[in-house]
Amino acid sequence: DDAVPFHGAHQAGIATPSQRNVAVVSFDVLAADRGELTDLMRALTDRARFLTSGGTPPDPGISAPPTDSGILGPSLPSDRLSVTVGVGASLFDDRYGLASRKPAGLTSMQTFPNDHLDPAQCHGDVSLQLCAENPDTVLHALRDIARHTRGAMQIRWQIDGFKSPPRPSGTPRNLMGFKDGTSNLHGDDTKTMDQLVWTGGEAGWAAGGSYQVIRKIRMLVEFWDRVSISEQENMFGRRRDSGAPLDGNDEHDTPNFAVDPVGTAIPLTSHIRRANPRTPDTQDSRILRRPYNYNLGIDSVGNVDCGLVFICYQRDVAKQFEAVQKRLADEPLVDYIQPVGGGYFLVLPGVRDTNDHFARALL
Ligand code: HEM
């Protein structure tokens, strides 16, 4: 069927195409010692392997509670589910004697200018990125994993996201109305993935993983919806209808900043120009984005509570995400967005086969 393969050198959910729905979930690990942490990683491996392939859950016998929640029916569809497991810097504190094994690149998310971070929605020991075509498949996977890891880890924060279908075509739109993901790294370009996304030999036991940055970014849509279309387009540097750069006609035309040094067509402060100036010295800061929209209804004063689940992958957070974020620091868009949560994680190397498990080379 259409299952996303689980076994491999790298975990699924990074280079593989985005599914329609996501849950990003951060956990605190409660395991008492290194042995229990290893058991947790084995349990995560077993559940991810089973859930992503789909199939019929085992019969529990007459008097036991059912082995499965049943919300997807008696036989589980794979629904292109991917389960992507990461670890945070805090897992390498004193608890499990792992301090000396912490990869140098794994740090705690910093607070940037204009951030409005809520500590209850930041950081964590373990991250799960659960992606599937349908939201009930994502919820089913989360309930299953939480049930099988109860006592070993507990949810710290969670944000669910969705992707719209292409309207009318091309890249899906974010909740500011703009196509989001037009200029991005491509998962099937293995050379670029090796160069910019997968960690290499420098990462030791973590080679084949990837650094994951999660940012829950609220959009102040009441304010945004009062801005003129030309001002909105100047903030991004692209047309709202087609997604074309302001110096081009089609979504996938390449903006030519070199012929526009003062920003006549595409303002110097625009999001795309700051994020990717397309100069030789900034090519190493490119990132692989996997954006989703989120919608939480209304807040306590009646404002729409929606935004972007910004997820990106890279080989080096300081040289890539943080370099881009610093260039974006005072872009005009900051008046209309508020980062409220997130964290940095290291996505573990892939599980090779049925004898392997997550973090085997670490534990
Ligand atoms: C491009 C929206 C936050 C990095 C874009 C584009 C849009 C967009 C509409 C142009 C279409 C495209 O090429 O994908 C947003 C919104 C954000 C946000 C609404 C917050 C709510 C961020 C953050 C970063 C980032 C936090 C990284 C620190 C990029 C990059 C590009 C991009 C690298 C591609 C630039 C290029 O290669 O031309 N974003 N973005 N964005 N954004 Fe964002």
Image: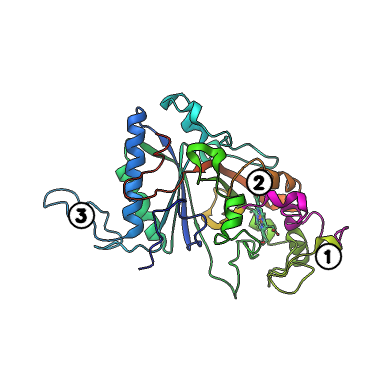
The residue nearer to you, when weighing 313 against 69, is: 313
Whether residue 237 is in magenta: the answer is no
Give the CA separation, mark 2 to mark 3: 45 Å
Q: Which residue is mark 3?
A: 58
Residue 32 vs 178, above or below: the answer is above
Kind of residue sitting beneath label 2: Gln
Q: Residue furthest left?
A: 62
* Image coords of residue 322 (percent x, y): 66, 43
Give, as a three-letter code, the residue at label 1: Ala
Whether label 3 lies within 8 Å of ligand 1 gets the answer: no
Residue lying farthest to the front in this orientation:
201
- Where disc 3 sits, the SS reads loop
- The label shown at residue 265 is 1
Q: Image quadrant for the C terminus?
A: top left
Q: Is residue 304 visible?
A: no
Q: Which residues are magenta?
A: 260-287
Mark 1 element type: loop
Residue under pointer 2 = 320
Queried whether the magenta region covers residue 285, the answer comes back as yes
| Callout 2: SS | loop
Report x, y in % for residue 213: 57, 45
Q: Nearer the viewer, residue 173 or 29?
A: 29
Q: Is residue 350 left or right of residue 218?
A: left
Question: 72 left or right of 219?
Answer: left
CB-based contact (under 8 Å), mark 2 and mark 3: no
Residue at horizontal 68 percent and vertical 48 percent from the top: 285
Q: Residues within 10 Å of mark 1 (few under 14, many from 20)?
A: some
Q: Position of residue 211 (x, y in %)?
A: 55, 44
**Marks 2, 1: nearer the viewer:** 2
Q: In whole angstroms, how far apart are the C-alphas of marks 2 and 1?
A: 27 Å
Q: Residue at x 78, y 54 (%)?
A: 279
User: Counting residues from the N terminus, which is met first, the one under dot 1 or under dot 3?
Assistant: 3
